[in-house]
Amino acid sequence: MKNCPIGVFDSGIGGISVLRNMRADLPREDFIYFGDDKNAPYGTRPEPEILRLAETDADFLLKKNVKAIVIACNTATSAAAAALRGKLSIPVIGMEPALKPASLFRKDGMIAVLATSATLRQEKFRHLMERYGEYAVPVPCPGLMDYVERGVTEGAELDAFLQKVLAPFRDYRFDAAVLGCTHYVFLKDAIQKAMPGVRLFDGNEGTSHQLRRVLSERGWLKEEGEGGIQLFSSAENPAVIRLMERLLATKP
Ligand code: DGL
């Protein structure tokens, strides 16, 4: 198992932000990334559809003989992690909005949780809110991930879109904001500009550490050689792979 690759999937390009962390954290490992760009976004779909798509994504990776699967997508984790864990014998690592660290950081303001509508309405998020959400405000951002899918991570159009999304929350004073969708991590600068002075949190580092922990417990960490990355997209469009490569080369 040690030398098998790690499979990573997302509805599209967002999971590349998680892959960036994992590659830095586990440089010996081989990664196979699958972005379901053809069917993105997931966050505006009903749960049974997200589950079906996530199962297809996992099948793609299983055929490549992966030793673990990372669901680098908050939306797909909420809809499919439990089902995938139930039927697979390899570890399945999921993601959740980083509300816990944000709540530990919070002073006397509120916490904005930016995520897809599907993530925010699911039971997994309700449980998270029960534990850490006393001062949290869910901020659904339909349409925001599309900017990343189009390769737009800055500019006036994105700034205006963020202003529109945040307008209903203008009266809140936020200490922290959680980027509860892996696509949004690529929009950090624009989000920071729209929410000046607010501390941003994401779950990427935590997910990478969890992957390391799980593999190490099983004695499945690759011990030698330099890791490689293979990128796949259901869109079968070379421009998407080029965009993945460009974003992968940016700093976490
Ligand atoms: N990257 C995704 C997430 O972390 C989902 C974006 C989407 O497909 O709507 O939630």
Image (spheres, rainbow, N blue to C red):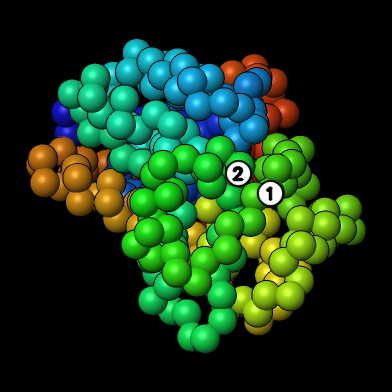
Q: Is residue 44 shown left or right of residue 61?
A: right
Q: Quadrant of the N terminus?
A: top left
Q: Position of residue 223 (x, y in %)?
A: 18, 44
Question: Which residue occupies 31% across, 50% down?
Answer: 26
Q: Is residue 76 visible?
A: yes
The residue carrying mark 1 is: 141
Which residue is found at the position 31% from the left and 40% from the top? 93
- Which amino acid, by three-letter code, is at mark 2? Thr
Q: Within the image, what quadrant is residue 203 found in?
A: bottom left
Disc 2: residue Cβ within 8 A of ligand 1's nearest atom:
yes
Q: Residues within 10 Å of mark 2 (few under 14, many from 20)?
A: many
Q: Is residue 251 visible?
A: no
Label for residue 23? none
> Which amino acid, by three-letter code, is at mark 1?
Cys
- Say which of 24 and 193 sits in front: 193
Q: Give how far across and how far down residue 84 sits, in percent.
A: 31, 25
Residue labelled with disc 2:
116
